[in-house]
Every structure is written in structure tokens, then in C-alpha cells.
Image (cartoon, rainbow, N blue to C red):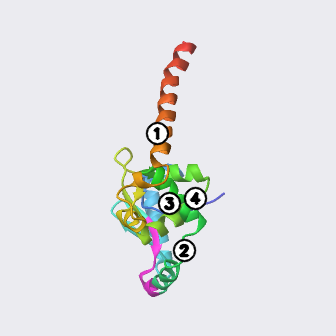
């Protein structure tokens, strides 16, 4: 069975975004002070590595070491001029037609983790991330003004079949909502 430190390390790695000590403690089923103690141990262990554990108030997250800045910049400068990958185009399309949308919903649609792809699109300036007013633990992604400028569009409505797809989505969601009460009434 994995120990507390390994469980916390796995959560930080998989989550990819800042996560609170309280949430980590709840997930691993440990007291908050024990989770915080393990986080500090992990932080010390990672201090001399290419990845570091950063703390911002109550939240913790893995990040690249400041000492690797030049290599990371070189990597991304080599990546950015290249054409968008199939995964990037897929995520960008989902955001363009369904956005603003959460990472969880993007991943639900795609069926795979989209952290790296979203990060790449953010770095390229093709999407922007904003706080989710309905759930402060997550972000919403939408296409950027730079993408619209690059495509020569005044708004997302200029995308092919945008209005048609939006109308279908609204019709589908209103149909689902109207069927909910009928199901409940029929079973009562």
C-alpha cells in the first residue's frame, strides 16, 4: 500500500494545477497537519531537481525549477512555431464551439487528459483562462482575441456553422430539461 507522501505526490502530479492542502488531506484521508508536513518534506526533496514544489498560500503545485528556465524556454520556442497538433486543434475546436468550458468538460468530450494541450494553447495565446464563477476550484477556457484576429473574425459567431451548432446545443439542453420533470412526475 502506498504511503501518505506517495499519494500526495501522485495527486499533485495528476492534478497539474494549484490544489489546497485541505483538499489534498480530504482526498488522502489524512489530517491537514499531516498532509502539510508531507508537502514540506516533498518540497525539500524536490529542491535540487528539475521540478520543484511551490507553495502559494494554501495551494501547492509542481513547477519547473527556476534553474532550468533557459532549457524550458528553448523547448517551448522550438514547439511554438510548429503547426498545431491534432490534439491541439481538437481542444481548440471544443473551446471555440462550446466555450467558455472547463478542463473537466473538455476532457469528458475528448476522453483523455488535456493538461499539456491546454497549457500549449495558453502559451501560444490562442485561448485564455478565467475563473469559474460557479466553481472556484476550476477555470473556464475560451478562445482569445488573438485567435479571432489571426482568423480574421470579429467574433466566434464567424466560425463555420457556429450558429447552427449553438442552436442545436441549446435545443438539446432545453429538451433534456423539459424531460426531467416528466420523468419525475411519472415515477411519483
Q: CA distance from mark 4 to mark 3?
A: 14 Å
Marks 1 and 3 sit apart, C-alpha to C-alpha, by 20 Å
Determine which residue is flagged by label 3: 92
Disc tally is 4
- Residue underneath mark 4: 113
Taking the image as drawn, is residue 24 in sight?
Answer: no
Closer to the observer: label 1 or label 3? 1
Which of disc 1 and disc 4 is earlier in sequence? 4
Which residue lies most toward the right here? 1
* Labelled disc at residue 142: none
User: In the image, is residue 101 above or below residue 2?
Assistant: above
Secondary structure type for disc 3: helix
Segment colored magenta: 61-70
Where is mark 2, residue-wise?
A: 83
Q: 14 or 34: nearer the eye?
A: 14
Report how far apart the C-alphas of labels 4 and 1 lie in the structure: 28 Å
Amino acid at each position: 500500500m502506498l504511503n501518505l507522501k506517495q499519494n500526495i505526490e501522485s495527486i499533485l502530479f495528476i492534478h497539474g494545477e494549484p490544489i489546497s492542502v485541505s483538499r489534498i488531506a480530504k482526498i488522502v484521508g489524512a489530517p491537514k497537519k499531516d498532509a502539510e508536513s508531507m508537502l514540506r518534506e516533498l518540497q525539500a526533496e524536490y529542491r535540487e531537481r528539475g521540478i520543484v514544489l511551490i507553495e502559494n498560500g494554501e495551494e501547492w503545485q509542481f513547477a519547473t525549477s527556476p534553474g532550468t528556465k533557459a532549457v524550458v524556454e528553448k523547448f517551448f520556442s522550438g514547439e511554438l512555431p510548429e503547426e498545431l497538433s491534432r490534439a491541439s486543434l481538437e481542444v481548440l475546436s471544443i473551446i471555440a464551439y462550446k466555450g467558455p468550458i472547463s478542463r473537466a468538460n473538455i476532457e469528458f468530450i475528448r476522453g483523455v487528459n488535456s493538461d499539456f494541450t491546454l497549457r500549449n494553447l495558453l502559451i501560444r495565446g490562442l485561448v485564455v483562462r478565467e475563473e469559474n464563477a460557479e466553481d472556484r476550484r476550476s477555470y473556464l477556457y475560451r478562445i482569445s482575441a488573438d485567435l479571432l484576429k489571426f482568423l480574421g473574425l470579429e467574433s466566434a459567431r464567424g466560425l463555420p456553422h457556429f450558429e447552427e451548432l449553438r442552436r442545436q446545443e441549446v435545443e438539446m439542453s432545453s429538451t433534456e430539461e423539459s424531460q426531467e420533470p416528466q420523468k419525475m412526475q411519472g415515477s411519483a
